[in-house]
Image (spheres, rainbow, N blue to C red):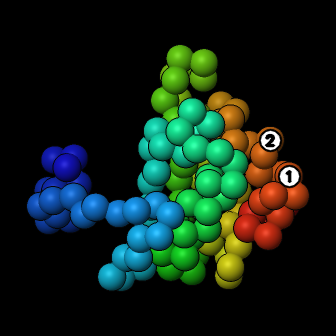
Amino acid sequence: LNPLLDAAAGRDGIIPFDIFSGTLENKADIIKCANVLNGVYFSLPEIKRALANLSANLNEGGWLFVSQNHEKYADGEAYLAFRKQGALLALSKEVNGHELLPHLKSALFSDLVLP
């Protein structure tokens, strides 16, 4: 666990969570998914399922950050910042062209991500 998070929030461990079916006891205001949701590990339909489940575990107005570290990105990282709006995710910010960006505008994601 990040020592800064431990000091600031008094967290003392990591809670295992299945991105496809996990349910948090209390919905979160912020979720960061780092180096997981990419085409190396998952297909686009699987990524959509994961995003939908992560969104279901967010409070209204909560933030979902999807980041990926790789040398192909400027500064070695790209990320997407989504804000939960009802049943949908609104893409609020995109940095360095995350590989999911063009797919989010496809029909596959149209019922999950606001245009």
Secondary element at tag 1: loop
**Residue 34 placed where, x, y %?**
45, 44
Secondary element at tag 2: helix
The residue that mark 1 highlights is 106
Residue 6: quadrant of the picture: bottom left
Furthest residue to the top?
A: 71
**Residue 20 placed where, x, y %?**
50, 64
**Observer-nearest of 68 and 30:** 68
Characterize the local packing of mark 2: few (<14), some (14-19) or many (20 or more) Cα atoms within 10 angstroms: few
Characterize the local packing of mark 1: few (<14), some (14-19) or many (20 or more) Cα atoms within 10 angstroms: few
Q: Is residue 73 left or right of residue 6?
A: right
User: Height in image: 86 above or below 74?
Assistant: below
Is residue 86 visible in the rendered structure shown here?
yes
Q: Residue at x 61, y 68 (%)?
A: 52
Q: Residue at x 69, y 42 (%)?
A: 100
**Observer-nearest of 30 and 20:** 20
Is residue 92 visible in the rendered structure shown here?
no
* Pointers 2 and 1 in contact (C-beta within 8 Å): yes
Q: Residue at x 53, y 53 (%)?
A: 65
The residue that mark 2 highlights is 102
Q: Gap between marks 2 and 1, in whole Å?
A: 7 Å
**Residue 50 placed where, x, y %?**
56, 60
Q: Is residue 58 left or right of residue 14?
A: right
Q: In what quadrant of the picture does the C terminus appear?
A: bottom right
Q: Is residue 40 left or right of residue 92?
A: left
Q: Is residue 17 left or right of residue 71?
A: left
Q: Looking at numbered disc 1 in the image, what kind of residue is underneath it?
A: Ser
User: Height in image: 56 above or below 2?
Assistant: below
**Residue 77 placed where, x, y %?**
53, 29
Q: Looking at numbered disc 2 in the image, what kind of residue is underneath it?
A: Pro
User: Height in image: 58 above or below 109?
Assistant: below
Number of marks in the image?
Answer: 2
